[in-house]
């Protein structure tokens, strides 16, 4: 990397929403062939800055230069034509189509009215070879792994000629093995002259992948520096502006009576195919059970089955000895279940309602929020102010719509609402997805407090660090079935990674033994 004209320069970027400055004089310079990380707390202004670069938002003031030339990025297609490509966190692929069809869709390179898939496939193959992506252009999306689907998203941007790739939280859905592969791909891209902006809350990934990092705090760019030699602790402290602890200490567990018993249940997915099969698991009072697994292995249907959002086809779910199989969600909530849903926008909050209203969503019909059937806005705001303070939910006010809040702060609000109620069981699905390290530390502490208070806690997460940090016991799910249940103290990331692919516990332990002796 040479210190020549930056590929991208964002100068003094200000973006105001009303009086609130989401970006407040941000400077960013990215060199050609560089992997440049953007690090900042939830709500610091990273997405806003990238939305400006990709033409989704217009800055209130400030300049953008590409290769030293001032540009106006007034639409996403303008951003595209300037060679800027976004690798989205949520893949936008059509399952029934091939890799090539997905990449060519919406692109300019079509021949007459029919797609020239042959020529396209050739070009895709050569891009895949050049950057070490190892994707078969003729494979159907439904037949390839999540990691490979992400590579299709990368290929999409390369196919359109992107020189600058923005990765937004790219590892959220990947296994540890896939994360290593992705980092190798990013290095290949950079080696071949592409420039990368990497947004992630994972500090070890920044250290493994990035050349430099720009830290953003409260809408301001604080510092840009090389990553080499910097520890995760230093990165975290600089980002948050105080010392952050990564490992949440906890006393040994003293599990008591069974709170949740899942007995041999079967649950179908939306297409009517069995997503959860012969699934049995118990969670006791005073313990945290972690459910580890790759996305799409039945976790969603399992939780929906337990919480009454989907029908349980066979088997039983009991809570404190009472059969609650196929009861209505409200009845299950009333039986003492707190639920932090994995999809906060579908099941966790109403985006058009205010933050204050969202914080009362589970209790609005009860005292003190309602009196004799009449809503008490002052009580609602009182609860909201308490929770916002306690959980450090950052928003311009408790009366902004939930939809305008940053992803991380939306999540903190849902967690606050669900943990504030006095429940016997907490089901926490991806409870810290998209959260910064400071917020993760806080949420983990609160989940452990629930366990200390004698609650049963089921944590479902793709994050193995999270599962290992929180759990007393860990169950691994693959293709809707439990592959194994292990004591958290007796396992590690590599072993869990192998179990998640469906390998038996014995086979995984054997494989890891061989790896050590090789
Ligand atoms: N359309 C909008 N109207 C009002 N406020 C907004 C709007 N978009 C973003 N904001 C506010 O701007 C701030 C920055 O949000 P942004 O999404 O850029 O943060 P972020 O750093 O990407 O956070 P996260 O890590 O949680 O995704 C937040 O406080 C958010 O509430």
Image: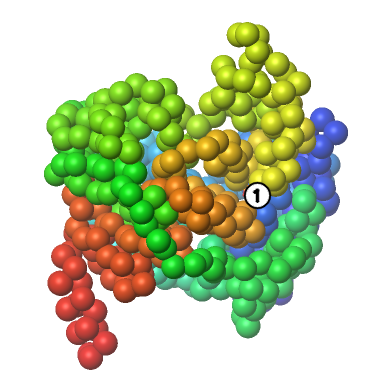
Write the residue at 65% across / 20% down: 369
Residue indicated by mark 1: 42
Left or right position of 451 against 66: left
Residue projecting furthest to the bottom:
517
Q: Residues within 10 Å of mark 1 (few under 14, many from 20)?
A: many
Tally of numbered discs = 1
Write the residue at 70% across / 32% down: 384
Left or right position of 387 against 351: right
The secondary structure type at the circle numbered 1 is loop
Q: Quadrant of the N terminus?
A: bottom right
Residue 140, image x, y percentages: 22, 44
Residue 415, image x, y percentages: 55, 42
Write the residue at 44% across / 68% down: 252
Pick the residue in front: 306 or 258: 258
Pick the residue in front: 222 or 497: 497
Colouring rule applied to residues: rainbow
Residue 329, image x, y percentages: 38, 25
- Which quadrant of the structure image shows residue 228? bottom right
For disc 1, does the CB lie below 8 Å from ligand 1?
yes
Left or right position of 217 against 139: right
On screen, 486 above or below 411?
A: below
Q: Quadrant of ligand 1?
A: top right
On screen, 75 above or below 441?
A: above
Residue 342, image x, y percentages: 43, 40
- Which quadrant of the structure image shows residue 30? bottom right
On screen, 18 above or below 440?
A: above
């Amino acid at each position: 990397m040479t210190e020549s004209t930056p590929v991208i320069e964002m100068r003094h970027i200000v973006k105001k929403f009303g009086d609130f400055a989401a970006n407040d004089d941000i400077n960013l310079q990215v060199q050609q062939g560089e992997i440049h990380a953007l690090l900042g707390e939830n709500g610091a202004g990273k997405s806003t800055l990238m939305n400006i670069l990709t033409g989704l938002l217009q800055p209130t003031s400030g300049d953008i230069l590409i290769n030293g030339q001032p540009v106006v990025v007034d639409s996403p297609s303008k951003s595209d034509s300037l060679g800027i490509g976004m690798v989205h966190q949520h893949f936008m692929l059509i399952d029934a189509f091939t890799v090539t069809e997905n990449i060519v869709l919406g692109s300019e390179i079509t021949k007459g009215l029919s797609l020239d898939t042959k020529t396209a496939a050739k070009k895709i193959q050569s891009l895949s070879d050049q950057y070490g992506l190892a994707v078969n252009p003729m494979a159907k999306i439904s037949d390839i792994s999540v990691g490979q689907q992400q590579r299709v998203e990368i290929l999409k941007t390369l196919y359109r000629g992107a020189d600058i790739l923005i990765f937004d939280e790219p590892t959220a859905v990947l296994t540890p093995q896939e994360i290593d592969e992705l980092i190798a791909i990013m290095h290949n891209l950079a080696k071949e002259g592409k420039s990368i902006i990497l947004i992630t809350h994972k500090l070890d990934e920044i250290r493994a992948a990035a050349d430099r990092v720009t830290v953003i705090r409260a809408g301001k760019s604080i510092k840009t520096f090389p990553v080499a030699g910097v520890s995760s602790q230093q990165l975290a402290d600089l980002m948050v502006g105080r010392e952050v602890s990564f490992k949440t200490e906890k006393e040994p567990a003293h599990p008591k009576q069974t709170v949740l018993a899942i007995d041999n249940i079967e649950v179908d997915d939306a297409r009517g195919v069995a997503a959860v099969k012969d699934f049995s698991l118990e969670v006791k009072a005073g313990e945290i059970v972690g459910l580890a697994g790759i996305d799409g292995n039945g976790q969603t249907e399992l939780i929906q089955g337990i919480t009454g959002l989907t029908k349980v086809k066979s088997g039983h779910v009991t809570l404190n000895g009472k059969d609650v199989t196929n009861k209505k969600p409200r009845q299950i909530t009333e039986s003492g279940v707190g639920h932090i849903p994995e999809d906060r926008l579908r099941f966790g909050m109403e985006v058009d309602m205010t933050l204050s209203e969202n914080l009362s969503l589970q209790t609005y019909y009860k005292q003190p929020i309602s009196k004799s059937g009449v809503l008490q806005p002052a009580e609602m705001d009182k609860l909201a102010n308490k929770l916002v303070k306690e959980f450090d939910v950052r928003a311009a006010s408790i009366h902004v719509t939930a939809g305008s809040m940053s992803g991380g702060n939306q999540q903190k609000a849902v967690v606050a609402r669900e943990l504030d109620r006095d429940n016997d069981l907490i089901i926490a699905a991806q409870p810290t997805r998209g959260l910064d390290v400071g917020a993760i530390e806080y949420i983990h502490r609160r989940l452990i407090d629930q366990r200390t208070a004698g609650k049963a806690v089921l944590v479902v997460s793709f994050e193995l660090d999270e599962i290992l940090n929180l759990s007393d016991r860990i169950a691994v799910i693959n293709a809707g079935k439990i592959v194994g249940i292990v004591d958290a103290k007796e396992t590690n990331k590599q072993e869990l990674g192998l179990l998640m692919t469906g390998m038996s516990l014995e086979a995984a332990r054997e494989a890891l033994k061989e790896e050590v002796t090789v």
